[in-house]
Amino acid sequence: MKRNKQKRRTRRGLQALTLCISTAMVLVLLGMVVLSVLSARNVSTYFRENLEVTVTLEDDMSPNEAQQFCKRLEKMPSVKSLVYVSKEQALKEGIRMLGVDPTEFTEGENPFTSMVRLTMRAEYANNDSLAAVASRLKAYPKVGEVHYQKKLIDALNRHLAKLSAFLLILALLLTCVSFTLINNTVRLGIYARRFSIHTMKLVGASWSFIRKPFVKQALTVGIVAAVLACVILAALVYAWYVRQPGITVAITWSVMAITFAVMFFCGIAITTVCAHISVNEFLRMKAGELYKI
């Protein structure tokens, strides 16, 4: 009797361990997809907010007028940051980029104009919004041209939209696959105890009483698997960070926190729901049906 009890305990322990490991692996894959979706959003915001809009100023605009103009721009909701570049600064940048002094060919006259370099907020970094902003800027007196890379913005928005849609679809598909895999693993664990379930039903135990230990075990497995999956994913991200410190632009602490929260929720919800469904399935079966599966 003792040996049989020990064998049953060992078998149940191995089943729980197998369920925990398999659930953790599935949650790691799910977490990687969630992390990719959230990181892609941060990358999109980073690139959008680093697109530069150059506003050239006419030569007769004085430094005081330029300062007043910059103060007005700072109050615009679409502007994230700006840098004023005077004619002298523009000349220095031109000499550094060209390698020669252009004033040597213009009889000492500075060929550059003063300008303001703007970076826009992510929600305004599209050609429609930028066209409206450009027309508004041109309405100011002594403002020359407004330059931004229309083709680059179109290509960036188009590719980022495709990437976001792909990752979202992949996340939905992987969620369905995760539910199926975890459900099958939970069902196999309960399948080995189907006769015990039927025996408890025969002696008059209620369905909720029979389900309780299975759901409780599934809840424990879900929590342990989620913790294990979070540790594995955190280790992978840290190893990536050691090699590429720049990933902090995309993978922030908030992204990691949301990813871990999703992994915990899915780990707990999927295992408990699957246990509930599987136990109910065996509870509905008659004695003869238990031998046929």
Image (cartoon, rainbow, N blue to C red):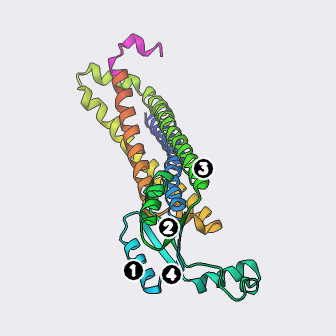
Which mark, residue 60? 4
For numbered disc 4, what is the local secondary structure? loop
Asked if 89 appears above or below 23 in the picture, the reply is below
Mark 2–mark 4 contact, CB under 8 Å? Answer: no
For numbered disc 3, what is the local secondary structure? helix
Nearest to N terminus: mark 3 or mark 1: 1
For numbered disc 2, what is the local secondary structure? strand
Residue reaching furthest top?
288
Residue 236 visible at all: yes
Disc 2 crowd rating (10 Å Cα; few below 14, some 14-19, many 20+) is many
Q: Quadrant of residue 86?
A: bottom right
Nearest to N terminus: mark 1 or mark 2: 1
Residue for badge 1: 68
For the point 29% across and 30% down, which residue is it? 210
Residue for badge 2: 119
What amino acid does circle 4 point to?
A: Asp
Q: Nearer the viewer, mark 2 or mark 4?
A: 4
Mark 4–mark 3 contact, CB under 8 Å? Answer: no
What amino acid does circle 1 point to?
A: Gln
What separation in Å lies between label 4 and label 3 (alpha carbons)?
37 Å
What separation in Å lies between label 3 and label 1 (alpha carbons)?
35 Å
Nearest to N terminus: mark 4 or mark 3: 4
